[in-house]
Image (cartoon, rainbow, N blue to C red):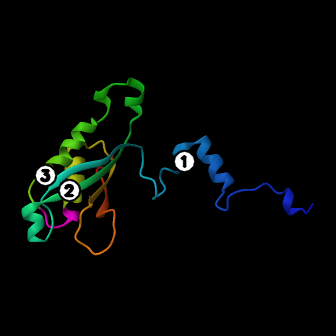
Amino acid sequence: MSSLSRLPLRPLNFQPLRRRALIQNPRAFMGDARFPKGDKLILKGLKFHGFHGVNPEEKKLGQKFLVDVDAWLDLNEACKSDNLCDTISYTDIYRIVREIVEGPSQNLLESVAHLIACATLNKYPQISTIQVKVAKPNVAVHGHIDYLGVEILRYNKREDV
């Protein structure tokens, strides 16, 4: 038996020190730019009919839009209390998204996503970071696609969040 066959098998990206530190202190790497701080609320697959786009047909006939929202905030108190007043209701964020997507026409999905992010951050200052994805599943392009869209990440400017 060769000496190589006695070595334990590990994935190539295995980083034992980082993994051990993460298990001992899960927040140790929350400052990493890839991980916004805190816990998050997740709203996935919201569907609306809106009139956004640069083409006249899009503004006149409208089309289906898909929206995902991730909102990072500290949910520690809500976890302890099990009380809705210690968190943000999903339905409140849903209403913001619906009002914007079903509201006045915008030319760009970038504008729609930005409006959703800003309105949510302005209403809920306890949110530190928000990620919004807006997609058009029925786009007139040649080829097979699931959707075309945009995803933005916005941060609360307040220092104490």
Marks 3/2: CA–CA distance: 10 Å
Query: Residue under circle 2?
Result: 64
Real-space CA distance between mark 3 and mark 1, rounded to the nearest whole angstrom: 41 Å
* Residue wearing tag 1: 28
Is 153 located above or below residue 75 in the figure? Answer: below
Q: Is residue 50 left or right of residue 5?
A: left
Residue 40 shows up from this direction: yes
Q: Residue 105: percent from the left, percent from the top?
A: 10, 60
| Number of the label disc, if any, that sits on residue 102 | 3
Tell me the mark number nearer the camera, choosing from 3 and 2.
Answer: 2
Q: Earlier in the sequence, mark 3 or mark 2?
A: 2
Q: Identify which residue is drawn at 49% across, 56% down.
A: 32
Q: Residue furthest right?
A: 1
Which stretch appears magenta? 106-111
Task: Give coordinates of residue 154: x percent, y percent.
Answer: 30, 57
Q: Is residue 129 magenta?
A: no
Residue 23, picture quadrant: top right
